[in-house]
Amino acid sequence: QYIFNIGFWFSIFAVFYIYLFIQYFKDGNKVWLYIFFNIWMFLIFNPIVHYFFAQTALEQFYSIPITIFFTIFYPLEIVAHSFYISSYFDDYLKIFLENKIYIYEVYTPLYFFILYILFSFFSIWSKKSFFVLNILMIGFNFYLYISGYI
């Protein structure tokens, strides 16, 4: 039953890309890696996600700093709710949630999806394949976020 679950496959790919990141970036500065990891995971996953879900918006980039900020914000919100002072954060959340978002659709073409998956797997053994994978990632993301405004 799980073999046909898209969330299951996204989880497998996420873990795969985490290990790929560790394999090639493990020797970097830890603070830089913490920030770069969130950016890279966001970008590396887009070609796979957009093969299944086409909805795209520039506001998706908010998820990068939000992911980093969430590790601080969430415990603060719990404490704030415990002491009934959570209303101080509500105005900032309302500004964010009331923002109008321009959404457009871009699917990952099948040929690119297959090529991307192949280079992802080849990257396990080859640094050159990993380099090509990152070029494909950058190219796709450029295409993804520019195409809605052309």
Image (cartoon, grey):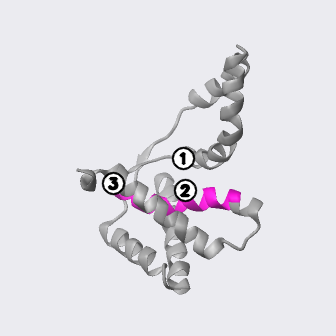
Q: CA distance from mark 3 to mark 2?
A: 16 Å
Residue span colored magenta: 34-53
Q: Residue at x 33, y 65 (%)?
A: 109
Q: CA distance from mark 1 to mark 2?
A: 9 Å
Q: Amino acid at mark 3?
A: Phe
Q: Main secondary structure of the magenta part?
A: helix
Q: Is residue 38 rendered magenta in the image?
A: yes
Q: Are marks 1 and 2 in contact (CB under 8 Å)?
A: yes
Q: Residue at x 57, y 29 (%)?
A: 97
> Any mark on residue 52, and which?
3
Upstream in sequence: badge 1 or badge 2: 2
> Any mark on residue 60, and which?
1
Where residue 56 appears, x then y in whole percent? Answer: 45, 48
Q: Amino acid at mark 1?
A: Gln
In the displayed structure, would residue 111 be above or below residue 60?
A: below
Upstream in sequence: badge 3 or badge 1: 3
Mark 1 burial class by Cα count in 10 Å: few <14, some 14-19, many 20+: few
Q: Can I make out residue 40 in this image?
A: yes
State which mark lies toward you, 1 or 2. Answer: 2
